[in-house]
Image: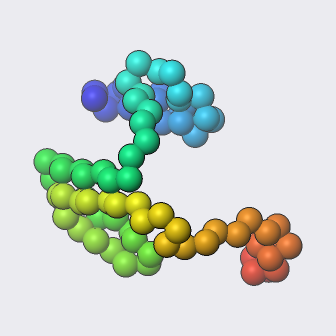
Amino acid sequence: MNKLKIIPLLLKLKKGKHEGKRRVHKFRTNYVELELKENITFNVDGEKLTDNKFVIEIIHNAITVYNDNTFINEIMK
């Protein structure tokens, strides 16, 4: 995608208005493989990983996420 076209799309993404746009494809999967032309750096759980190929796999029930506002406010103090 042309870099100039990415900017408006990222702004729509930030506002949550990106769905239904021509260049946005929505799908469900448990596995994604990214292969890039150049190396990029990902931050995974505080660890920097730099490569041009990444495999992301969803492991069901691997973690439990709690959304407890009292707890969040307490740790954010």
Q: Residue 22 sits in which quadrant?
A: top left
Q: Report the residue at 38% width, 24% height from top.
A: 23
The spot of residue 46 in percent (x, y) is 44, 78
Q: Please, which residue is most extreme toward the left here?
A: 37
Q: Viewer-proximal residue, 25 or 73? A: 25
The spot of residue 65 in percent (x, y) is 64, 69
Q: Residue 52 sits in which quadrant?
A: bottom left
In the rendered view, tell whether residue 29 sits above or below residue 62.
above
Q: Please, which residue is most extreme toward the right here?
A: 70
Q: Report the residue at 51% width, 21% height from top.
A: 20
The spot of residue 27 in percent (x, y) is 42, 36
Q: Please, which residue is most extreme toward the top here?
A: 22
* Direction from residue 59 to residue 35 in the image, left or right: left
Question: Can you see residue 7?
Answer: no
Q: Quadrant of the C terminus?
A: bottom right
Q: Report the residue at 75% width, 81% height from top.
A: 75
Task: Tell how many labels.
Answer: 0
Q: Report the residue at 44% width, 33% height from top.
A: 26
Colouring rule applied to residues: rainbow
Q: Quadrant of the N terminus?
A: top left
In the rendered view, tell whether residue 12 sits above or below residue 76.
above
* Direction from residue 28 to residue 39 in the image, left or right: left
The spot of residue 66 in percent (x, y) is 70, 69
Q: Viewer-proximal residue, 30 or 71? A: 30
Question: Can you see residue 23?
Answer: yes
